[in-house]
Amino acid sequence: MLSREELTYFKKELEEMKLQIESNFKSSSFEMNTLKDTQPKDEGDHASMERGHTIANTLMEKQAEKLEAIERSLKRIKNDSYGICDSCGEEIQVERLKVKVFADYCISCREVIEKETK
Ligand SMILES: [Zn+2]
């Protein structure tokens, strides 16, 4: 089991990450709005703007996924199930949690899931 100190540490990490992503969201939606207001001068400009939007959208999606995982972990800390693998119910190694604070699965389950989704 994780010690109280470790839990406090992970909770702090998660909360900081959450704040970071939320402020990223605010600033990137602001950038998107300013982009919308600038009219493209010709086709070339338009194409590069489209590309910019796609990259921004992918980044936003990644961030949104990460935010969801962080919120799941914070909920788990609240109901004392943080650090337990979502698939096999075994404890996730502390070393792994330190690398990926919002990990849902232990290393062996993660590997199985990644193989299945590929
Ligand atoms: Zn597992």
Image (tube, rainbow, N blue to C red):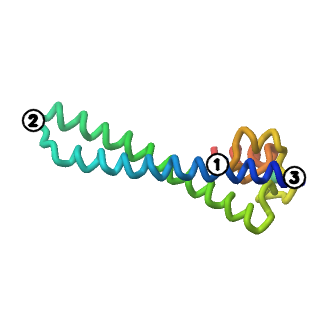
Residue at label 1? Answer: 117
Label of residue 52 in the image: none
**Circle 2 SS class:** loop
* Quadrant where the image shows the C terminus: top right
At 82% from the left edge and 44% from the top edge, which residue is drawn?
94
Amino acid identity at mark 1: Thr
**Residue 116, position in %: x, y?**
69, 48
- Label 3, ligand 1: CB separation under 8 Å: no
Q: Which residue is mark 3?
A: 3
Question: How far separated are the C-alphas under marks 3 and 1?
Answer: 34 Å
| Total residue callouts | 3
* Residue kind at label 2, given as amino acid type: Lys
Label 3 to label 2: alpha-carbon separation: 59 Å
Labelled disc at residue 41: 2
**In this rendering, would 93 be left or right of 74?**
right
Callout 3: SS = loop
Along the horizontal axis of the image, is 74 left or right of 3?
left
Judge the density around disc 1: few (<14), some (14-19), many (≥20) Cα neighbours within 10 Å.
Answer: few
Figure quadrant of residue 89: bottom right
Task: Give residue 6's position: percent from left, percent from top.
Answer: 81, 48
User: What residue do we see at 56% from left, 54% from top?
Assistant: 67
Of mark 3 and mark 1, the one earlier in the sequence is 3
10 Å crowding of disc 3: few (<14), some (14-19), many (20+): few
Mark 2 or 1: the one toward you:
2
Q: Residues within 10 Å of mark 2 (few under 14, many from 20)?
A: few
Where residue 75 appears, x then y in whole percent?
Answer: 68, 64
Disc 2 and disc 1 in contact, CB within 8 angstroms: no
Residue type, numbered disc 3:
Ser
The first of marks 2 and 1 along the sequence is 2
Which residue appears farthest toward the bottom when viewing the image? 79
Asked if the beta carbon under badge 1 is closer than 8 A to the nearest atom of ligand 1, the reply is: no
